Amino acid sequence: MTPTLLETVQPVAATGVFSWAWLLIVIPLVSAAVLLLIGRVGDAWGHLLGTLAPIASFTLGVVLFVTMLGAPAEERSVAVPLYEWFGSGNWSIGVGLQVDQLSILFVLLITGVGSLIHVYSIGYMAHDERRRRFFAFLNLFVAAMLLLVLADNYLVLFVGWEGVGLASYLLIGFWQDRPSAATAAKKAFVVNRVGDMGMALAIMLMLASFGSSAFVDVNAGAAELQPTTATVMGLLLLLGACGKSAQLPLQSWLLDAMEGPTPVSALIHAATMVTAGVYLVTRSHAVYGQTEFASTAVVIIGALTLLAGAWIGCAKDDIKKALAGSTMSQIGYMMLAAGIGPAGYAFAIFHLITHGFFKANMFLGAGSVMHGMNDDVNMRRYGALARAMPITFVTFALGYLAIIGFPFLSGFYSKDHIIEAAFEHNLVVGILAMVGAGVTGFYMTRMMLMTFLGKKRWADDVHPHESPLTMTIPLIVLGLMSAAGGLLLNNWIGGWLEPAVGGAHAEGHAPSLLAITPIAIINLVVVALGVLVAVLVFGPRRDIPVTAPVTRNPLTIAGRNDLFGDAFNEAVFMRPGQGLTQGVVVVDRSGIDGAITGAAGTVRGLSMIGRRLQNGFVRSYALLMVLGAAVIGAVLVLSQLG
């Protein structure tokens, strides 16, 4: 029987190779510990150990995936209990893993793309004195991300969630000698803590509602939730998802996070951390199935973010920040699809995987360009790099064609599914998704033209050159996956994910232009218009000034300033927060501290008076005794006379 929204397949007990699933996490975790503790003796080989760790996890992940393929559908969700974490009364929180159709795809993506990024980092970080530590942090991040997606309950997932936040802080601020990098790391950490509060409160609400945070218990009990409880739970989970996936209104950290080394951008901001929110919403399908309000909120957040990210991407001259805006936008598409419900879950994960291929490809391609351009990130000082860097150009071009939805490449399949589902869900949402696709065609074409084509605009002391094999081989692999990934997954992924996400999968495109839908054709036209506008404005014959021209266009100004996200946060949260804090300090000092110090002063004053009476002289004590006796005698005499 096909599972409904709340009737997802129950996990079976782990046997055979699945009993070793915990090694997926332990291998990179142990490698990280060794690299951090071994000291400088490991500088010569630490990067090799750090690279072998995700490769080993990827190999095990492939074995698990192949084993799962050969098992009946009802046996593809496997529970791997490890130990009891803690118990209290009727509560028993265990640490365990759930290897199912959803988590195994994330395992392959994290370890597969992660391994390529590690290989790339060998060349990219070759001259960094702290390369061993960098690989340790990469391994720590991979281990935390694997725990996040493999956990069998929300509480253990939260441990991985926080581990990812810690590792991202360490990686974004890796070059902490740069004030901008240190500030970006702190900003990412603080903004994500806001989302984490939502996640933590959602877990508390689950424990109060179900007595458990295990996925199986939440899925089984979700149907009994009161609508208000389900809505609050869904909104709290969405808040957590917005933090990790840089969705409005918690998106401000993502563009500053480009201060980290470029492999960090590829790992965190393309294939792993920023997709955690999409995973959370998809994994929580049972909760969102009970609350239309929270599901609609997910759709609205996704739709607004995909447009906001595209807007930012149009205005940035920094190649990495333009790609970061693009990441915001593409994650918005995934969130939109996840919010649609059963028909959209598979599409969200489909686009998540293809995005991991082509966006990691382009981030690493940007790093390759920077490598050949003396670390310059300004596209206005590029131009005509196609001849100097042919491998980088071709692989980047494959990623570009994939993200704009060129026919038969990965984005054509995955993003078109989302746009069609959006139109079926709501006309306005569908139009917004299609407009976002057109804007994507514009800013990505702008990036290609400014970077690889046209006239050269670099300084005389810059000598562009192709990157070494350790950097270009991962680019080639990711470029091929950007091209073929959609075609390989299109007619398979929906049926594969259906038991895990509890939703029916709509039929995908047939791999032929003659069979695509009218909406897909219209979308291609819209994208083509975006490409045409970019060619007219930034074409090879256009003279692009090296310095960005001053503009009064409010749209451009807003895009260059990240839609004033920082200014908004400062005005709405930081300044009032500072005022509130200062007010609390005044109350604390004048009120609470004043009362305490006042009481202490009173006691001290009384003690000083008593101290004067206790001076240690016998004559004084004798005089006091005589005076006391006189007073007592006088009182007795007066009482007798009265």
Image: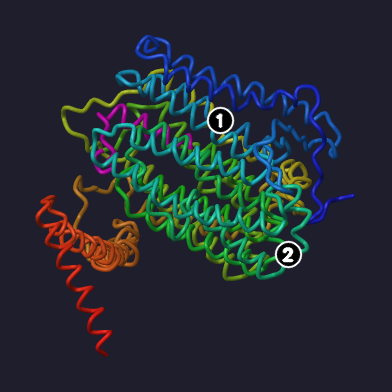
Horizontally, residue 44 falls left or right of residue 476, namely: left
Depth check, mark 2 against mark 1: the one in front is: 2
Horizontally, residue 248 falls left or right of residue 409, namely: left
Where residue 362 appears, as percent x and y from the top left, is 44, 37
* Whether residue 278 can be seen here: yes
Frontmost residue, 493 versus 118: 118
Residue 488, above or below 121? below
Asked which quadrant contains residue 604, the reply is bottom left
Secondary structure of the magenta portion, mostly?
A: helix
Frontmost residue, 425 versus 401: 425
Furthest residue toward right: 1
- Under mark 1, the amino acid is Leu
Where residue 161 appears, as percent x and y from the top left, is 53, 42
Q: Give the labeled residue for mark 1.
A: 480
Distance in Å between CA atoms under marks 2 and 1: 46 Å
Disc ID at residue 225: 2
Frontmost residue, 417 versus 455: 417
Pointer 2 or 1: first along the chain:
2
Count of numbered labels shown in the rendering? 2
Residue 227, above or below 37? below
Crowding near pointer 1: few (<14 within 10 Å), some, many (20+)?
Answer: some
Where residue 544 appears, as percent x and y from the top left, is 24, 48
User: What residue appears at the point 52 percent right and 62 percent down from the top-left corner?
Assistant: 301
Asked which quadrant contains residue 574, the reply is bottom left
Residue 283, above or below 225? above
**Residue 421 is inside the magenta segment:** no
The magenta segment: 360-381
* Whether residue 583 can be seen here: no
**Residue 362 is inside the magenta segment:** yes
